[in-house]
Amino acid sequence: MTSLLASPAGGPLSGRVSVPGDKSISHRGVLFAAMSAGSCRLTGVLDSADVRSTIEAVRALGAVVLATGRRDGGLDLEVTGWGATGPVRPSGPIDCGNSGTTARLLMGILAGWDVEVSLIGDESLSRRPMSRVMEPLARMGASFSPAAGGTLPLRVCGGRLRAIRYEMPVASAQVKSAILLAGLRAAGRTVVIEPAPSRDHTERLLPGFGVGVGRDAGERACWVDGPARILPSDLSVPGDPSSAAFLAVAALMVPGSAIVLDGVALNPTRTGFVAVLQEMGARLTTSVDRASGAEPVGSISATYSSSLHGVTVAADRIAGLVDEVVILALAATAATGITRFEGVGELRVKESDRLQAVQEGLSALGATVRSGQDWLEVEGPVRLHGGRSDSLGDHRLAMTWAVAGLVARGPVTVERWDAVDVSYPRFAHDLAQLQDGSRVG
């Protein structure tokens, strides 16, 4: 395991950075291409541990994937899918690593095929709940044999599916996507209704692969009609807004900074963190300049903001910024007053218990943080001091503690820094491009 020594920034952050390819879109691009009846070219795919798990999974299920590295650190892929013949039974368990997206979306894909597949994962993934996916898929006709507690390892036994209308108790793009993908093999219309909007990459991407997706924004419903065939399609993956959020907050907090993040996916279901930061008084703007398929793409400009103030983020907004709560909590340490996040219980079942980790980690650096079962409060402003912070193997925590080191009075040593490989392997490199003062040890 590596550590990162994140030292206080010696000056403003400046320059332009292109963040890596979007993780959610990369996963879906690989999976949809593998399901298609033909060959697809995917460019700008995120090269990370999580996406590698998905690539290896579809290979094990019979897809052919040829990968070429890019100068920017991403991947270009040629994927030949299994089409109408369906996935093959792999020679052994499929290792999903740390990737909940890989595991949950595969459950939906495999549910409609006469194939038996075992899914395993690392220690962290094996603690994350899978019952929320198994329950609706079982109603459709699939069967599962999970570990005690409804977690990995589990065995998926697919079969003939029936369409359902499913009202989700908790907004989750992964659960929604798994049901829609199973619906492609079910006879009739499969409808998913969300309690709050979640990211909609599946709904945006499927039409490009020849699958019609219906949507009713008023009812927060989406649906597919099955059985449906996925056709081959090429895809260019834009930059990940969740990754961009960490660099943006660094610029907002380091005096004199002004940076531009180029080529970022600006899907409205992914830019909730931008709206929250703007409400806090941040000098943060977005500009859409093109489209990548159905995804708007553009830039994020972030400038040092000295007058941040606390806000309340209501529960119905969390699904659109759930991956950014940890870095928003760090930004809140520089804001006057209390910043409160409501309805964030989902963070307790991520790669770590992020609510507990944020409270303990920021408190150890001198912040005033309180939390309950599904809420988090940060009171500011406070100038953090240095210390040692453990990522707990969680990539979002690792990047948050690295940014904390830039704005603290003293260095922050980030333990288990290699967790960033899950989503942003070159994060330290990109920080170094914007400032001097961090090094990997």
Image (cartoon, helix red, strand yellow):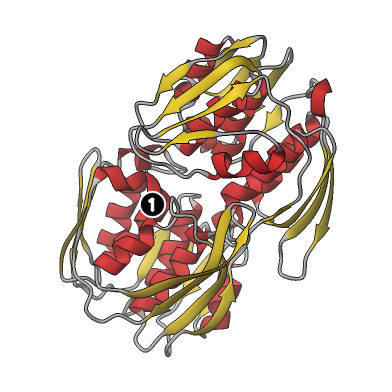
- In the rendered structure, the answer to whether residue 232 lies left or right of residue 372 reads right
Residue 411 visible in rendering: no
Residue located at (76% from left, 50% from top): 234
Q: Position of residue 240 (x, y in %)?
A: 55, 59
Image quadrant where one finds the C terminus: bottom right
Question: Does 440 appear above or below 77?
Answer: below
SS label for mark 1: loop
- In the rendered structure, the answer to whether residue 411 lies left or right of residue 22 reads left
Q: Amino acid at mark 1?
A: Leu
Residue 189 visible in rendering: yes
Quarter assignment of residue 70: bottom right
Residue located at (42% from left, 42% from top): 198
Q: Position of residue 287 (x, y in %)?
A: 48, 71
Residue nearest the observer in this picture, 139 or 231 = 231
Residue under numbered circle 1: 321
Q: Position of residue 135 (x, y in %)?
A: 47, 16
